[in-house]
Image (cartoon, rainbow, N blue to C red):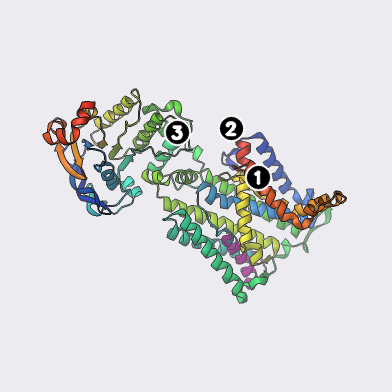
Amino acid sequence: MSDTVLETRDLTVRFGGHVAVDHVTCTFATGELTAIVGPNGAGKTTYFNLISGQISASEGSVHLKGRDISGLPVPERVDLGIGRAFQLTNLFPNLTVLENVRLVIQSKRKKGFNLLTMAASHTELTEAAEAVLERTNLAAQRDQIVHELPHGTQRKLEVALLIALDPIVYMFDEPTAGMSVDEAPVVLDLIEELKADTSRTILLVEHKMDVIGTLADRIIVLHNGALAADGPPAEVIASDVVQEAYMGRALEDA
Amino acid sequence: MLRRLISGDTPRSTVLSIVLLVILIALAFAPFLFPGTRSVDTAARVCIFIALVASYDLMLGYGGIVSFAHTMFFGMGAYGVALASIHMGRGFDALLVGSVAGALAAAALAFVIGLFSLRVRAIFFAMITLAVASAVAVLVSQLSSITGGEDGLNYKIPRALTSAHKFMDDKLFGVRINGKLANYYLVFFGSLILFLILLRIVNSPFGRVLQAIRENDFRAEAIGYRAVYYRTSATCISATVAALAGSLYAIWLRYVGPDTTLSFEIMIDILLMVVIGGMGTLYGAVIGATIFVVAQNYLQNLMGIAEAALGDLPVIPLFLNPDRWLLWLGVLFVLSVYFFPTGVVGRLRRRV
C-alpha cells in the first residue's frame, strides 16, 4: 500500500470569484480506500469532477501513475483507468438495465466502432453484463426499462455501471444516498469486496460516519474547497477540528 | 438467414410486418403490377427516398443529430453522376466513378462539418449545416458553366439502362423487357442494399453507442465513448448513403437540377417522412417515404376524382380542387403528428 497511483497537485478551480477547490495536494496509494468528507458545498463533488475530467482545473494538475492527465478529456481518462459513479443518478433512461451495463462492457472491450456485426450476436458482451447484474443483485430487473425502476434500484445500477467498467481508480460519489435500509448494505458489501482487491484504489464520498469508520483506510476532509484534515479514520474523526467544525452533527446523526 | 439479413431487427408487430411485406412486394414487382411510366417512376422515387430517409434517420433518430444538409449530400451524389457522365461520356464506368466520387466528397464534407461543429451544442451543428447547404445551393445555381445553373444538367446514361435497349422482343406479362426495366431494378436493388446496410449499422454495437449518446452523452463519455467521434462517424455514413441514393436518382432521372436534389423543399419532405414514419426506427423510413411520395404523386388525382364526384354540392368542390393538394398534404401531416406522435411505426409497435 505504498506506491502512489493518483495524485493531485495544487488542484484548484474557480467559478468567477468563488474558489470551489483550493490548492488541494493529495496522493492516493494503490489498494487504499479513501473517504472524502466535508460539509455540503465543501467541494467534494467538484474535486471528483476535476479528477475524472468533467471540468478542467484553473490551476494545478492531476497525475495518474505519474502521468499528467489534467488536459485529457473524460473518455481518455476512462481509458487510462479512472471510473466514476455519480451522485445524481445518471443513466441511459430509455434503455434496459442489461443494455446499460452492456454498453459499459462494450466500451471496455473497445467494440464501439464495430459497424457491421449485430450487437445481439456478441454473446460474450451479454454474458459479461449478466455476470455484473448477478453480482450487483440486479439480475431480476435485467429487461426492465431504467426510467421505470424505483430510485433505489437506479442508484444500484449506477454502481453496477462502475463495477462493469472495472477501472483502476473507483470513484463513488455518495453511492448509498437515497437508498433504502435494505439496499444500502448491498452496495456497501460490493465496495468492501472491491477493497479486497489490492490492485484497485477507491475514492468514496460519503456522509454516514459509521460506514466510513469501518470501511475507510483513510479519511480526508475538505472545507471550503481546501484540505482540512488527512489521516486514519479514528484519528480524523476524533480530531478537534473535525469534531467541532464539521463532524459534530454528522456524528450525532450516526 | 432472413433474420441475419434484417440484422435481427424484426418489425415486432403483425400489422407492421404485413404492411412492410406489402410495400416490399409492391416495389419488387412494381413494373409488372403497376405498368405505366408514371407509376413506375413513382415506385422508383419511393425506393430512393426510403434509402435517403433511412440515412437521415440514422442521424436524427439514432444519433439525435439535427442536420439540414441532407439534400446537399443527396445532390453531391446526383451531380457526381451527372458530371462524370458528361465529361467521361456515357458508360457504366462514368456512373461508377461519379457515384464513388460523389460519395467520397459527401463523406469528406460531412467529416469536416462534423469535426468542427459536433463538439459543441446540437443547435450549432444544425445551423452550420443550414449555412453550408445554402451556400452550396447558391454555388450550384451560380456556377452555371459547370453545373448548368438553375437549368440543371441533362446527360446520357448507358443504353442498356434506357428504354431504347430491348433485351427480348416479346413482352413478359405484358411488360417490355427493356433497359428502363433494368434501370428500375438497379434502383430497387441499390436502395434495398443501402437500406439493409443501414439496418445492420443501427443494430450493431456502433448503433447502440449512438443510442446511448442520444440518451445521455454526458454519461456515454463517462463510460469511455468519445461522443464527437461517434457523431461524426454517423454523419459521414449518413452522408455517404445519401450521396449514393442521389446517384441512383440521377441514373433514374437522367437529369439533375437544384429543384430535384438540392432544394430546401426536399429537405423538409425528408423531415416530414421521418416524422410521419417514426423516428429512431428505420422501418419508419419505409412507411414515411411510401406514404409521402405516393401522396405527393397521386393526391391530386384522387382529389380530381373526388371533385368530379361531388361537383354538384356547394363549396366543397372548391376544397377538393386538385390545385389545393398541398393543403390536404398539410392536413395529412398535422393529423399524423397529432395521432401518431411517435410515428406510424411507433404507434404500431406500442406495447399493449
Q: In this view, does B209 lie to the left or right of B285?
A: left
Can you tell which mark lies on residue A97? 3
Q: Which residue carries the number 1 mark?
A: B336
Q: Quadrant of the N terminus of chain B?
A: top right
- The image quarter containing residue A167 is top left
* Between A56 and B158, the one nearer to me in the picture: A56
Dividing the image into 4 quarters, which one contains the C terminus of chain B? top right
Q: In which quarter of the image is residue B169?
A: bottom right
Q: Residues within 10 Å of mark 2 (few under 14, many from 20)?
A: few
Give residue A239's position: percent from left, percent from top: 12, 33
Query: Looking at the picture, do discs 2 and 1 lie on one chain?
Result: yes
The front one of B187 and A216 is A216
Label 1 marks a residue whose chain is: B
Q: Which residue has dot 2 on it?
A: B351
Find numbered disc 1 in the image and state the secondary structure of the residue it sits on. Answer: helix
Q: What stretch is highlighted in magenta?
A: B72-93
Contact between labelled residues 1 and 2, with CB atoms less than 8 Å apart:
no
Q: Disc 1 residue type?
A: Ser
Foreground mark, 2 or 3, reads: 2
Q: Position of residue B256 (x, y in %)?
A: 66, 66
Hey, what amino acid is under mark 2?
Answer: Arg
Residue located farthest toward the right when viewing the structure as drawn:
B312
Check if mark 1's residue and mark 3's residue have beta carbons within 8 Å.
no
Task: Name which residue lies at 66% across and 49% down.
Answer: B333
**Can residue B89 be seen?**
no
Label tally: 3
Q: How far apart are marks 2 and 3 (CA)?
A: 18 Å
